[in-house]
Amino acid sequence: PRNFIKVTNLLPLFRGSQDELAFYVVALSLPNFGFSSRVSKKKGFGISQYAEACNKLMLALRYDQY
């Protein structure tokens, strides 16, 4: 999906039996894309830095596998 709002359309697909949650969904927004604002006016925040930031977030949320 292009942005986190589009992810909300997919959330009903992740429901388990009896409308219980079957999954936790972490929908990250890509910086400088869609509704996200610029990360920095300085150059250097590329895909590698974004991946590292996402990994740190997931670890902070206590997901060691994702």
Image (spheres, helix red, strand yellow):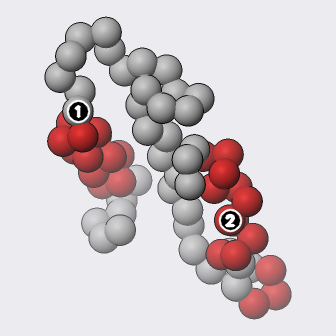
Type of amino acid under label 2: Leu
Please tell me in which quadrant of the rendered image residue 63 appears: bottom left
Check disc 2: other Cα within 10 Å, few if <14, some if 14-19, many if 20+: few
Check disc 1: other Cα within 10 Å, few if <14, some if 14-19, many if 20+: few
What residue do we see at 57% from left, 74% from top?
Answer: 23
Report the residue that reaches farthest toward the top: 41
What residue do we see at 63% from left, 56% from top?
Answer: 7
Residue 9's place in the image compared with 31, above or below, is: below
Is 61 on the left-hand or right-hand side of 7?
A: left
Q: In 3D space, how far apart are the residues under numbered discs 1 and 2 (Cα atoms)? A: 27 Å
**Position in image of residue 37 (x %, y %):** 49, 20
Marking on residue 64? none
Helix, strand or loop at mark 1 = loop
- Res 29 visible: yes
The residue to which callout 2 is attached is 10
Residue 22's place in the image compared with 36, above or below, is: below
Viewport quadrant of the C terminus: bottom left
**Position in image of residue 13 (x %, y %):** 70, 76
**Position in image of residue 11 (x %, y %):** 69, 65
Type of amino acid under label 1: Gly
What residue do we see at 18% from left, 42% from top?
Answer: 48
**Of label 1 and label 2, which has the lower sequence position?**
2
Residue 28's place in the image compared with 19, above or below, is: above
The residue to which callout 1 is attached is 46
Is 54 on the left-hand or right-hand side of 29?
A: left
Is 58 on the left-hand or right-hand side of 51?
A: right
Is 43 on the left-hand or right-hand side of 4?
A: left
What residue do we see at 32% from left, 14% from top?
Answer: 40
Helix, strand or loop at mark 2 = helix
- Res 56 visible: no
Residue 22's place in the image compared with 7, above or below, is: below
